[in-house]
Image (cartoon, rainbow, N blue to C red):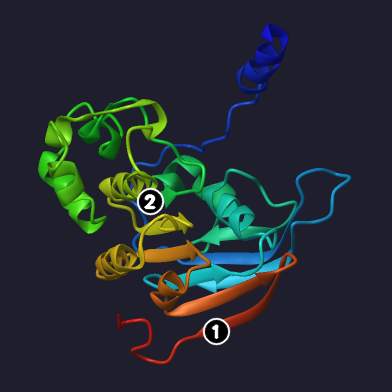
Amino acid sequence: MLRLQGERLADIALAAPEDMGVPRLSERAPDPRIEVRGVGFRYADNEAEVLQGVSLTIEPGESVAVVGPSGGGKTTLLKLLLGIHAPLSGEIRIGGMPLSQLGLAQWRSMVGTVMQDDALLTGSVIDNISFFDATPDIEWVMQCARIAAVHDDIEAMPMGYHTLIGEMGSSLSGGQRQRLLLARALYKRPQVLLLDEATSALDVERERVVNQNIRRLQLTRVIVAHRPETIASATRVIVLHQGRVTQDLRSVPGAGRGT
């Protein structure tokens, strides 16, 4: 068992650090345009491509739902957009600039994410939403919680926002964990929000409220989803099937704005 755990630690300790790029002195680029140009990717040389020649453009302020069968490459696409993986072919450009040139540090400062395997950490509710900011903006923490429709849940906890969360958020329901993770993503005031099944554990009514709140924000949204309510909140739907874009559907004006 010790040997096994040592090998797992070695995977992390011996991994090459990410090239985060040169820190920039300028402010974050306003309303970045996301371009995916002929991107292909596979996880291993002897495996089939997960993405094959994927090309799409997401304009600033767009709300895009990425849908399709399981294994179609939706989560992989989000990880490529985050720079967790690098394309084997093609490129990703942000605001007309290659992601490699913009730098991961610069790009990630502009992006808020909730992935399927994200976890909460041992600490208070405030710690988790502010991601352990040394001087958290309490008012903004509470506002983010309201947007994520988790403020009332927090207020009902024994110590409110100072309530301690157990390891991996074990003391919370699945829906509460997802909403706290969403509040954490919003705390950094992102220009782009990437969500991977971020509301899958919510009931339909709570999901509707969360989607309405997020839709009011001035930011770009890219959402991987299966549930009709979440898909309906987007103004554009991209269908990924077997690693390829098979449909790119734009809603008529006013679509996705109802309940």
Residue 132 is situated, as x and y percent measured from the top left of the image, at 28, 29
Can you say which quadrant of the picture contains the N terminus?
top right
Query: Which numbered disc, 2 or 1, marks the residue that appears first in the sequence?
Result: 2
List the residue tagged with mark 2: 110
Q: Is residue 188 left or right of residue 161?
A: right
The quarter of the image holding the C terminus is bottom left
Q: Which of 127 and 25 is in front in this view?
A: 127
At a point 14% along the width and 32% down the height, the residue shown is 158
Q: Distance between the residues labelled 2 and 1?
A: 26 Å
Q: In this view, does 162 lie to the left or right of 9?
A: left
Residue at mark 1 = 249
- Name the secondary structure under disc 2: loop
Tag 2 near tag 1, CB within 8 Å: no
Q: How crowded is the residue under tag 2: few (<14 C-alpha within 10 Å), some, or many (20+)?
A: some
What is the number of callouts on the image?
Answer: 2
- In the picture, the disc for residue 111 is none
Q: Which-is-in-front pick, marks 2 and 1?
A: 1
In the rendered image, the vertical position of residue 5 relative to residue 45, given as above or below: above
Give the image location of residue 238, x and y in percent.
57, 75
Residue with the most extreme right position:
46
Q: In the image, what residue type sits under mark 1? A: Leu
Q: In this view, does 84 lie above or below 133?
A: below
Frontmost residue, 18 versus 79: 79
Q: What element carries label 1?
A: strand
* Kind of residue sitting beneath label 2: Met
